[in-house]
Image: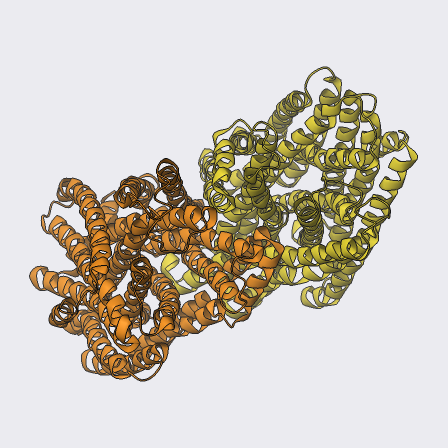
Chain colours: A orange, B yellow
Amino acid sequence: MLVVAYLGWSIDREPAGTPQMVEIAAYIQEGAQAFIKRQYRTITIVIALMIVPLTILFKDVRVPIAFVFGASLSLLAAYIGLRVAVKANVRTTNAARTSSAKAFALAFKGGTVMGLSVAGLSLIGVSLLFWLYQDPNLIVGFGFGASLTALFAQLGGGIFTKAADIGADLVGKVEKHIPEDDPRNPAVIADQVGDNVGDCAGRGSDLFESMSDDYITSMILGSALLSSLGMNGLMFPLMLGATGIFATMIGVFVVRMCKNIRPIMAFNIGLLISAIFCALGTFVSSMVLLNDITVFYAAISGLVASLAVGLIVQYYMGLNGRPIRKLAESSERGAAINIITGLSYAFQSPFLPFLFVLMAILFSYLITNGSLYGIVACNLGTDLAIGIIMSSDAFGPITDNAAGIAEMSGIKIENERALEELDAMGNTTKAYTKAFAAASCTVSTVVIFATYGEMTKLYSVGLGLLSPVIIIGLLLGAAIPFLFSSMSIGATAKTAYQIVDEVRRQFRENPAILEGKAKPDYARCVDIATKNALIQMIAPALLAVASPIVVGLLLGKYALGAMLLGGLGTSAILSPLFTFGGGMWDNAKKYIEGKAGMKGTPTHDAAVIGDTVGDPLKDVAGPSLNIFMKLTNMTALLIAPILLLL
Amino acid sequence: MLVVAYLGWSIDREPAGTPQMVEIAAYIQEGAQAFIKRQYRTITIVIALMIVPLTILFKDVRVPIAFVFGASLSLLAAYIGLRVAVKANVRTTNAARTSSAKAFALAFKGGTVMGLSVAGLSLIGVSLLFWLYQDPNLIVGFGFGASLTALFAQLGGGIFTKAADIGADLVGKVEKHIPEDDPRNPAVIADQVGDNVGDCAGRGSDLFESMSDDYITSMILGSALLSSLGMNGLMFPLMLGATGIFATMIGVFVVRMCKNIRPIMAFNIGLLISAIFCALGTFVSSMVLLNDITVFYAAISGLVASLAVGLIVQYYMGLNGRPIRKLAESSERGAAINIITGLSYAFQSPFLPFLFVLMAILFSYLITNGSLYGIVACNLGTDLAIGIIMSSDAFGPITDNAAGIAEMSGIKIENERALEELDAMGNTTKAYTKAFAAASCTVSTVVIFATYGEMTKLYSVGLGLLSPVIIIGLLLGAAIPFLFSSMSIGATAKTAYQIVDEVRRQFRENPAILEGKAKPDYARCVDIATKNALIQMIAPALLAVASPIVVGLLLGKYALGAMLLGGLGTSAILSPLFTFGGGMWDNAKKYIEGKAGMKGTPTHDAAVIGDTVGDPLKDVAGPSLNIFMKLTNMTALLIAPILLLL
């Protein structure tokens, strides 16, 4: 956190550029503040409403305290990242005026703040609570609070950003033929705000809860499975967390040293060196704390699987790969064929990454001689690189926004292609992070599920797999993520409608806006997106929390266990399906604009439709499903002690 | 089957109309024959290739004999239905020239041939084999043969029909602005052929295997669970099958009597009366054969659930309902918003029907005091109305084709709106059948799975639900239907490309075609669709058969059991998601054309894109997933005796 403070300070002291840039940055900052203030208020109300029931249910005030603490730290981590990102946007634009290397350094610095504050606060929070409570079972509330907050942050932010994006594009680019990020577009500020509150703050909360949940479940399972090792078993996950943070700092340092090579290469070298240090730290921790080399192997298999997913992402997303080329070609036959072909690729894309993850789980289980702790270690392994990957993710929206600010303020930058190249790199790393998040999240959920299973002793059930209770719970669980996806996609569509109507209204009622002679009412679009996003995020979040409670109380702990498994099965596929699919449509459009040079043709129009369809999938439904799976499982974990009494 | 023969004869003796109509009908018949001949040859080769391995594996020649018999009867049932449907098409058009009531009667008669031949041949086949073998376990091969054939028929037919449909529409309607079913369009005959080979023959094979699998699994489970009842337990499923056939005949008779009311009302009355007779027959069978009223309740819950699904279909598909209206409205904001909104509805639509099905399963289990036989009875209940529902399904493509022939031959019909009204009704009943098929299929698969569980004694597994073997099998199973969907959607897209290119080529190379002065080369399009459909159907079918074998042999019977459950979970949602989604896009387009009267506007263009996207989903991926789930389970059932030896 000291490094975070230093980086924040060093970004702050950079100059923000021309008065016009400062003005635009102020609009974005205001919009982001307005959204965050109202969103945090809504989340605070929900959190507050749950304190009393939690206290009554658990008859122990430490559970709701952990819950509030987890929620607060999650909000804090995202807020720090967001604030610094908003500052870094305009400063990156300004730096790009004179040096593209400096622009890269600044944007990456902004991303690192997010990565380190997420990883740092999560480790500090869990360690602190464990030091106070001395019982990992009491910390479940912390993870539940973090998960609940993350779902709200991701859903609210995601709906906001995509509705603004779609609204701005459909009226601006498609109907009025003005360029992207044109200051005449009333939704342009909302779009920029969205990049910060959705992509930055949302993903930050997501990974915060991912790490917190992993520490907590690893400690609970560790205390059950490694009871002979005493405190060492409990310290192992925390040591791995610390290892990851130090390795991230080293990796980030390496990236900043590599000034004279292409940014994407610099990042790859940093990631590799970071991974090597992670492996070293894990080896030392495994031998010193557990004296068990197999745990080290299991953790490394998780690390390798999470990095291998990156290769598959490059195949599906790469502008030189077959899928993007085929998808771009298919657009020549119109929008319908583009969508069908995209769907076909999207439905296929999760399979290989998923297979890697399953193989890592199976390997970890077998290498540790059939111990569930192998899977725990594998899961901790998938988290090792989270810090540096998160840094590269938050870097994406910063450069995206920087390019937008440059466009809007019409300033001249040193190297015209510099920001574009950084933006393209940001797209790749964003896709990579999402795939990484989905893979990491699948293993996490398996471990949370296993923890639930341990707590409720899901060892034998009447007729085994044949029991109708299991079958029905499982099928119900499989169905719910589809309903959740429907809600989040529908919410984005509804909010986007309203932005479309508002932008159309402003253009119609004040033709001077389009002529560039009058300022559009940016705040109105921000306000519509804020209000709708906050209302629309409630129902899906409720579904995630209520479904395990209802099924657990009505059909019992076995049905709930089966429901969790069914839900895991579908969300673990749907989430990468949405993010890969959306990313492919986006990149096919980029391919048509860039390599094929067909901007403005019917083929390009078809690809724009595909890109728009992919937006709510890749930035709302996909990422929030990751949180959905963990939240349903954390909810089950939270109520497990109560189910045991029934 | 005697009734089938009579109906076929009575359709045949109707006049086929003007020479031009006869000529068009001849084209369609030729195309259908050409496709069926090559498709059946391909299927025969696959079937033949499996005889030797089956004989070696089972060391009992009765298994491969049952397998070949099941495959042959499935092909025969579909062929009878298809032949009569092709004849009924043109005769329905001709009847519509003078009387719309007569047109309805003829089309419905054509559909009834399909319904009765499917139900009849399935019952005859299973009964005959049981009479010969006296052991239901030996008949599994019959169901496996029927399922394998059905998957080929549905995939091949589905890819053919949708590729032709999309190709004809994209170039004809969208690019050249000629009407649907215009004789100048080179792909128009392929489109008509497709309606017959895809919708009629494909669905016929699907329901044939559904019924056969249900008889077989009910008899196997019956002999295990009701062993005290001896032969009565084995006869019960067959008696229910016979009940369904008689009730269908009564229902069809009622529909034909109701000449003076709207066709959809006539059908509803027929369905209701048929359902009442089903209930009566089931009551008698339950009391006489099993002396157990709870089995009657369980069967009725299946019947009720399958009929209740129809109400939900009407909500989602109805031109007066909220979803269609909202989807049509969303099209005003362009194709992208239409697709996003459609996806949101599609992802939500399976939930309620699925919940009905799960409730029926739970009810059946509880009412029979926790007996798996309750679920068997529930499953038999969902099949009771299959005959009459199948009749109304095959009726759909017949009227669709009749309208097409009228358009192509330019004849005058008595009541302009008569065929249109029948066509619209056909769309509703088609959607209804698909929803019914998905619901029935979900329960069927649960029962096949339970049969597999009984045979392999899946009663207790190491750590229960916590066992990583279970978790990995389950997650893998959940992933495979997505891969399967990707393959079937991609296959349609690829074939559609080629049709688009061919139609464009014909228009380009011979401009006289568009002027109506030269005949297009219809046969070339039929040939391209045939060749591609047959090649593309192989890989997905292989996936369905190979995946359970590979997992069973590599990871064992528990992992395979879990895989089946995981696969059931996702395919049971994806299948109705695809069919509902596609149907909604289709009907939103109809709403915009009809009620809103906006044909030719940008809103309509947006809706046409949505409709095209929905085509491969609703007619290829959705229906073949139904077969996919049963086939994977039947494969597991077939290899269960071998897994037990490992």
Q: Is residue B65 visible?
A: no
Residue at horizontal 31 percent and vertical 84 percent from the top: A260
Q: Quadrant of the C terminus of chain A?
A: top left
Vertical placement of residue A108 versus B273, above or below: below
Q: B118 or B258, which is in the foreground?
A: B258
Vertical placement of residue A63 versus B538, above or below: above
Q: A69 or A156, which is in the foreground?
A: A156
Total labels drawn: 0
Residue at horizontal 18 percent and vertical 73 percent from the top: A242
Q: Could you say which quadrant of the image residue B248 lies in?
A: top right
Residue A66: image location, x then y, percent = 13, 53
Residue at horizontal 28 percent and vertical 58 percent from the top: A206
Residue A432: image location, x then y, percent = 38, 68
Vertical placement of residue A37 versus A111, above or below: above
Residue B173: image location, x then y, percent = 68, 44
Q: Could you say which quadrant of the image residue A440 lies in?
A: bottom left
Q: Quadrant of the N terminus of chain A?
A: bottom left
Q: Is residue A471 visible?
A: yes
Left or right, B567 with respect to B129, comes to left
Q: Residue furthest right?
A: B19
Vertical placement of residue A373 versus B296, above or below: below
Residue B475: image location, x then y, percent = 45, 59
Q: B213 or A617, which is in the foreground?
A: A617
Q: Residue furthest left?
A: A132
